[in-house]
Amino acid sequence: MTRLLILMRHAKSSWDDPALSDHDRPLNKRGRRSAPAMAAWLQRQGWMPEEVISSTAIRTRETWQLMGMTARTMRFLPTLYLASPDTMLTRLSEASGGSVLMLGHNPGIAEFANRIVAHAPDHDRFLDYPTCATTVIQFDHEDWSDVKWRSGKVLGFAIPSEVLE
């Protein structure tokens, strides 16, 4: 059995209100366009999450909401807010769905993406992982707890500017 990870950085957030904490920043106009565009890209490929594991930040919650998708299980975890790659791997190991969407933040998500795949995609934005960047990664494991560094196969990678219509 294979496992599918949809690894997404939150969409572009707003810096308009300096009184807001970083955790509470909402998406800006560009971010509100990018999230549904990335969801449409995923849907066209048939990549749908059964489970969502996300940071509790407003911008990750809003990204998921604007994607307009459904999932059997959704978990919003404080430990994924600005998480390290090791924390992200630990949270992923607790997943149960065959396909999981993980929503997080840089710099951790960029490093996680680079470390979890056996071979990085040939894309000049993969290493810096801009807002709403999404990688779809396949693992040949029965259980998420078996996933190790450098074990994923990239099925797709896209950024909003490539998929916005």
Image: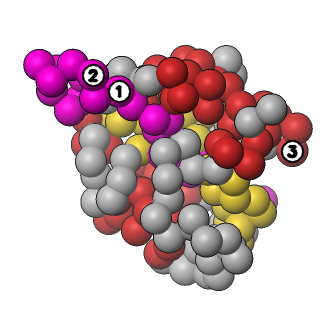
* The residue stretch that appears in magenta: 1-24
Say whether marks 1 and 2 touch (CB < 8 Å): yes
Q: Amino acid at mark 3?
A: Gln
Q: Amino acid at mark 1?
A: Ser
Q: Amino acid at mark 2?
A: Asp
Q: CA distance from mark 2 to mark 3?
A: 35 Å
Measuring from the top left, give residue 147's x and y in whole percent. 54, 68
Q: Residue at x 69, y 53 (%)?
A: 158
* Disc 3 versus disc 1: nearer the observer: 1
Residue topped by disc 1: 14
| Quadrant placement of the C terminus | top right
69 or 130, nearer to the observer: 130
> Does the magenta-highlighted stretch encompass residue 6?
yes
Measuring from the top left, give residue 69's x and y in whole percent. 68, 22
Res. 121 image quadrant? bottom right
Q: For the residue labelled by badge 1, is the local secondary structure a helix, a strand or a loop?
A: loop
Q: CA distance from mark 3 to mark 1?
A: 30 Å
Measuring from the top left, give residue 55's x and y in whole percent. 36, 36
Residue topped by disc 3: 45
Q: Earlier in the sequence, mark 3 or mark 1?
A: 1
Q: How many residues crowd mark 2 within 10 Å: few (<14), some (14–19), many (20+)?
A: few
**Mark linked to residue 16:** 2
Q: CA distance from mark 1 to mark 2?
A: 6 Å
Q: Earlier in the sequence, mark 2 or mark 3?
A: 2
Res. 64 image quadrant? top right
Q: Residue at x 44, y 23 (%)?
A: 28
Q: Is residue 37 toward the left or the right of residue 104 in the image?
A: right
Q: Residue at x 69, y 37 (%)?
A: 38
Say whether marks 3 and 1 touch (CB < 8 Å): no
- Answer yes or no: is residue 71 visible: no
Measuring from the top left, give residue 34's x and y in whole percent. 61, 32
Q: For the residue labelled by badge 2, is the local secondary structure a helix, a strand or a loop?
A: loop
